[in-house]
Amino acid sequence: MATLSAKERARLPDRAFAYVDSQGKRRLPIHDAAHVRNALARFGQVTFEDDAAQDRARIRLLNAAKKHGIMPIGFISAQLQPDRHLPTGQVTFLLADIEGSTALLARLEDRYSDLLADVRRVVRAALRPAGGHVVSARGDDVFAVFEQAPAAVAGALAIQREMQAHKWPGGVECRLRIGLHRGRPQLTETGYVGLSVHAAARICFSAHGGQIVLSAAVRAAIEEPLPDEVSLSDLGAWRFRGLPEPIEMFQVETPDLASDFPPLRSATPAD
């Protein structure tokens, strides 16, 4: 592949690059088949500003590959393959989902992508010190995993505190519902698989914005006392759609976060 000179690169329009960052720096030229193949090989070496920017670049690159008749099988496999450092065995899942995302999208319109990028940055920054591994960040939710249950609780609290302190675009209020569940899923080439993954999603979607709920499985795995200011309030047993047995649920409470919420949503009391 011939190397682009600075003059040749300058003559190319922005659409000839898979990625143009917020400062106008252009990366991964895709104007011909040879450069598309090179961009497919180098995609994983590029540092993107956020997940949304990476998603846009991925789509542009795949469209360019289709245009030039290139089958990017290796590229797709690499994008689907999970982080090989993800924990296995008994793990604790953390799912965080934006409450009222449709209304926020209608209000912010084009600025919603900025809010989404902010949420992902907040979540990632809060999870990292707690030892959390982000499995995926798609649409309005973030899926993470921890080896230890207390670390997952600490990560969830850090997220809600950062969400509460953050200044959101357009002066809107953005709140996350967070659910924690523990199980022994299978880690495959496309991520975690198992009933515990589905249970974690159901638990997350039962919560309200600003709330942290967790299952009895997580509660049982907390062997050491939580910090003095953190307590677990028993919410009783609840039935979730598609799950065979009711689950005893708890709410994480601390003085600096809201704790007064309506009953769980999208679930029914087991009693």
Image (cartoon, rainbow, N blue to C red):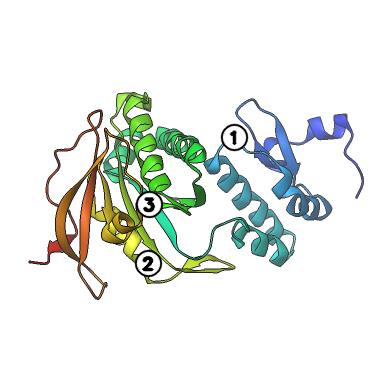
Pinpoint residue 227: horizontal percent, then vertical percent.
32, 36
Tell me which residue sits at (83%, 54%) in the image: 34
For residue 95, the mark is 3
Q: CA distance from mark 3 to mark 2?
A: 12 Å
Q: Quadrant of the C terminus?
A: bottom left
- Estimate the spatial distance between the alpha carbons at disc 1 and disc 3, rounded to whole Å: 23 Å
State left or right for residue 234 relative to residue 195: left
Mark 1 vs mark 3: in front: 3
Q: CA distance from mark 2 to mark 1?
A: 32 Å
* Residue 43: x %, y % from top left: 71, 49
Q: Secondary structure at mark 3?
A: strand
Sequence-wise first label, 3 or 2: 3
> Where residue 233 appears, x then y in whole percent?
18, 46
Q: Which mark is residue 196?
A: 2
Q: Amino acid at mark 1?
A: Glu
Q: Which of the labelled discs sits on residue 49, or is there none?
A: 1
In the current view of this chain or complex, which residue is farthest to the front? 224
Left or right, 218 with respect to 28, comes to left
Q: Secondary structure at mark 2?
A: helix
Disc 1 and disc 3 in contact, CB within 8 angstroms: no
Q: Say few, some or many: other residues with alpha carbon within 10 Å of mark 1 (under 14 / 14 to 19 / 20 or more).
A: few
Q: Residues within 10 Å of mark 2 (few under 14, many from 20)?
A: many
Quarter of the image for residue 256 reads top left
Residue found at x 34% / y 58%: 181
The amino acid on which the numbered mark 2 sits, given as a three-letter code, is Ser
Tell me if mark 3 has few (under 14), some (14-19) or many (20+) residues whose alpha carbon lies within 10 angstroms of its own. Answer: many
| Residue occupying the far left of the picture | 271
**Res. 27 image quadrant:** top right
